[in-house]
Amino acid sequence: MKKAFSLALALMMALSLAACGGSDGAGGASSGGSESSGNSSGDDTVYTIKLGTDTSDPATSPDFNAWGHCIERFRQLVEEKTNGRVKVEAYYDSVLGGIPEITTQVRDGELDMMYSIILSTFDSRMGFRSMPFVFRDLEQIQRLYANPEGEIYKLYSSYAEELGIHVLGFGVGNFRGLANRKHRVTVPGDLSDITMRIYEDQTVKNFLSPLCNATIIPFNEAYTAIQTGTCDGIEVGAPVINYAKFYEVCGYYTDINWQATSYGFHMSDNCWNMLPEDLRQIVIDCSWEASAAEYDQQVADTEAAYAALEELGVEVYHLTAEERQAWMDYADTLADFFRDYVGAETYDTVKEIVAADSAAHPAA
């Protein structure tokens, strides 16, 4: 696995000697007249940006893949609105590494961009976004997170800046449930005999490890791990169960919706500083435009995902109000840990922001 990753990374580096540093402009787009490009300098340098992600390629996984389509929309918008002066090359399916690897590469300036999240392993304060039951619904995430004026987005972005990573735009993502191959899960105690794949974040591990054997496995290895019995299930959103075909190895899904995973466009400091200001702003605008479309698709995909899974033979279980409260009560027992881990200031700030928003926008 390490050898394959090294070869992929070496190939990327060989292909991008001037990654985000531009080319000499030979054969590049015309520098004339487009209002959207804002190119008043006559500079016809072409900037090629390499983007890594663990998201699946929409060309091979077109259905229920709002993240993949968001990247493709972003790529097209950037090339169109810069008149070809900026081109984005996307590397899907963790070909450049999982979330920790691509985040390290972006932080260190070895990779121009990633479409993903920054985990708490890089900054424990980032753990606020993976705490259980923080957000009520996708609409709240859109107001607070998937919005350039959102208070949660500004908080996340400020922490990323301290790491030397520029956050250009964020989407809403989807809420995560539990899929497994053994039996129905309704309350926390039902996980006691299950080995559950989790992603590479300490807050996730601390939520699930008291309940089950919570095992960190890269996303691109999770299907095989369930298939071979290395683990019994995965906590992930219903749309992802569809597009990644986990329904082939998991017969049960429960919508505990304990956490929402939102993805965004992150740029290295090297790439940020290389791009002229006019192009930088266009790239930012394109990231928000693509993310806005991702919201619409996530809402539609979430509504359709459950029915699609049932048609494929998966038992989809929707928690009762009492069962959901049991999960929330369990999460409350971990509040002190989360507050200590992400930091009291961050924890209290996030809780206050969300509470104020919930008061201003009561649930229907």
Image (tube, grey):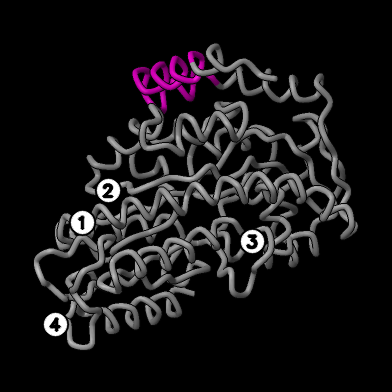
Label 1 close to label 2 by CB (< 8 Å): yes
Find residue 184 and report its image quarter.
top right
Element class at badge 2: strand
Q: Is residue 225 above or below residue 317?
A: below
Q: Which mark is residue 166?
A: 2
Quadrant of the rendering where the C terminus is positioned: top right
Q: Which mark is residue 311?
A: none
Q: Amino acid at mark 2?
A: His
Separation of disc 1 and disc 3 at Cα? Answer: 33 Å
Element class at badge 3: helix
Q: Amino acid at mark 3?
A: Ala
Comes first in the chain, label 4 or label 1: 4
Separation of disc 1 and disc 2 at Cα? Answer: 7 Å
Task: Tell me the residue at 41%/40% (across/down).
Answer: 120
Task: Tell me the residue at 69%/51% (across/down).
Answer: 301
Comes first in the chain, label 2 or label 3: 2
Q: Is residue 28 above or below residue 70?
A: below
Residue matched to label 4:
24
Separation of disc 3 and disc 4 at Cα? Answer: 42 Å
Comes first in the chain, label 1 or label 3: 3
Residue matched to label 3:
222
Comes first in the chain, label 4 or label 2: 4
Task: Tell me the residue at 15%/62% (across/down).
Answer: 274
Stretch in magenta? 335-356
